[in-house]
Image (cartoon, rainbow, N blue to C red):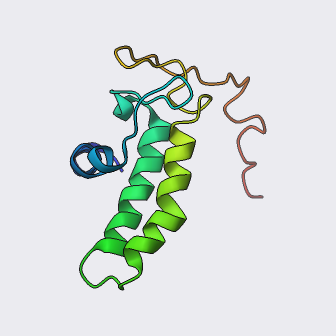
Amino acid sequence: MEGPEYAQTLRQLTLWTHHVLLPVYGRELTSTAPWCGRWWEHPEAVAQLHGLWLAWGELTGPGSGMCGPANWHRDYLGQVMTSLRDPMGPFAGCKPSAHRAKEVPPVESKDPFGPLPLPA
């Protein structure tokens, strides 16, 4: 996604994260379970939360089965929150009042195999 579509999706994800996910499932911050107040600046967190939100919509929305919410808790919530709040996860180095951008591992070449050969 790009541009307005990305901005609208991120806004909806933010509303869900701030008004549903964190008030219910956002446990206390500790050094072993960090969270960043600027989570949207961590691409890995956005990707994982987006998947969690999409699963929420599918499993708890209109037309979902009676077991949908239980399946969401069992199959998605715990794994994503554990991954996000892992001390080595995307919020490593962030403190409750201080965001720290994650350093991306270096790569020597974006495409180590070069351009594809032209067809003969």
Judging depth in this view, the residue of 31 and 57 nearest the camera is 31
Q: How many marks?
A: 0
Residue at 38% in and 72% down: 69
> Residue 83 placed where, x, y %?
57, 43
Judging depth in this view, the residue of 8 and 70 nearest the camera is 70
Quarter that holds the C terminus = bottom right
Residue at 42% in and 57% down: 52
- Give the answer, above or below, for where 70 lies relative to 98: below
- Give the answer, above or below, for where 9 lies relative to 69: above
In the displayed structure, does residue 100 sit left or right of residue 15? right
Residue 6 in sight here? no
> Residue 48 placed where, x, y %?
47, 48
> Residue 2 placed where, x, y %?
33, 46
In the displayed structure, does residue 115 sit left or right of residue 8? right
- Give the answer, above or below, for where 9 lies relative to 108: below
In the displayed structure, does residue 39 sit left or right of residue 48? left
Residue at 44% in and 67% down: 72
Corner quadrant of residue 103: top right
Judging depth in this view, the residue of 118 and 110 nearest the camera is 110
Residue 75 in sight here? yes
Residue at 52% in and 66% down: 74
> Residue 92 placed where, x, y %?
55, 24
